[in-house]
Image (cartoon, rainbow, N blue to C red):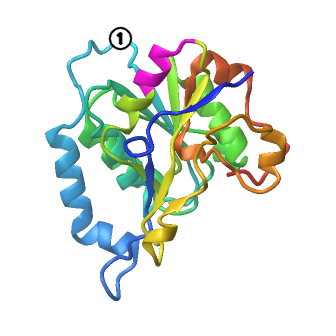
Amino acid sequence: RFCCMLASTREARTDRIRRPPPAGMTWGAAFAEGGRADLLHSIARGGGPRERVADAAPEVSVLIPAFNAEATIAQAIGSTLSQLEVSTETVIVDDGSKDGTRRVVEEVTRAAGPGRVRLLQHPGAANCGVAATRNLAVASARSPFVAFLDADDWLLPGSLAVRLKALREHPEVTLVYGRVRSTSSPSPEREFVGSGVPTQSVHMGTWLLFENPIPTSTVMTRLESARANPFPENLRHQV
C-alpha cells in the first residue's frame, strides 16, 4: 500500500517551464544562440555533490521521460544537477523523439561529467508511451530512492533534499510529494496547481474522480516500491 505525505509546501514543489523565449525566437533557437552556452557553462562549473566514488550508488535517481523535448530538457536536467546536499544520477529515456532531444542531452551529459547523466532509449528507438518510458527508467535506476520529473518541468532548490529527508525519517511511508507552481499562471491565486494534501483522512478513489492530487513531477518513492508497482503501459495517456 502506498502511504503519501507532503514533504514541504514550499521547498518540494516543481516549477513548470512556461516562460516564453525572447520575442521572435523559439525555445530551440534561444537555446542554440546563447542560452545553451550559459547553461552548459553553469553545469560544467558544478552544482550538487560530486565527491562520491564513481562506482558508489547515488542517493537519488531522477527519472525523466523525454519525447520531442529539445526546447526544455536541458533546463530540466540542469535543475537536477544543481540540487545541493543530495548525490544524484539523472536518467533520461528518449521515447522516440524526432527533434534534437538526444543531441541536447548528449551535450549536457558531457558538460556534467562522468556518471551524473545517463541517456537511454527503447529498442529500435521506438515510441512506446510515457508509462513504458518511466518503467524503463525505473528498471535502470541505481539509487534506493527515485524521483520523477517531466522534461518540461524543473525542480526548485532543496526539492530533493526535503523529500529524501521525509522518506528516511518515516520508514512506514512509501511516497512523498509536493505541489506544482505554474510560471504561466495569470494570477497569484492560481499559481499553485492542485489542492495539495488533505488535512484529514480522505477516500483516495473519490478524490481521483475530481483531480489528480499527486503531480508526477513532485513524486519521490522507494526504488523497490516503484519496481513492484510499475506504471500500467496499457494506459497511453497519463500525467
What's the magenta region?
164-171
Residue lying furthest bottom: 24
Q: Which residue is mark 1?
A: 56
User: Magenta stretch: dominant SS?
Assistant: helix
Say if the magenta span includes residue 168. Answer: yes
Residue farthest to the front, as pictured? 200
| Quarter where residue 93 is shown | top right
Q: Is 34 drawn above or below residue 115 in the view shown?
A: below
Residue 201 rendering spot, x and y as whole percentages: 72, 34
The residue shown at (58%, 55%) is: 67
Residue 30 rendering spot, x and y as whole percentages: 31, 73
Residue 140 shown left or right of residue 62 in the figure: right
Q: Position of residue 148 (x, y in %)?
A: 54, 38
90 vs 87: above or below: below
What is the number of callouts on the image? 1
Which residue type does callout 1 highlight?
Answer: Ala
Picture quadrant where residue 112 is located: top left
Looking at the rendered structure, the secondary structure element under dot 1 is loop
For the N terminus, which image quadrant? top right
Asked if residue 137 lies left or right of residue 28, the reply is right
- Asked if residue 157 lies left or right of residue 15, the reply is left
Q: In the rendered image, is residue 143 in sight?
A: no
- Quick check: 99 above or below 24? above
Q: Nearer the viewer, residue 42 or 199?
A: 199
| Point 41% across, 51% down: residue | 154
Residue drawn at the location 27% of the way across and 40% of the way down: 82
Residue 210's spot in the image, x, y percent? Answer: 78, 57
On the picture, is 130 further left or further right than 79? right
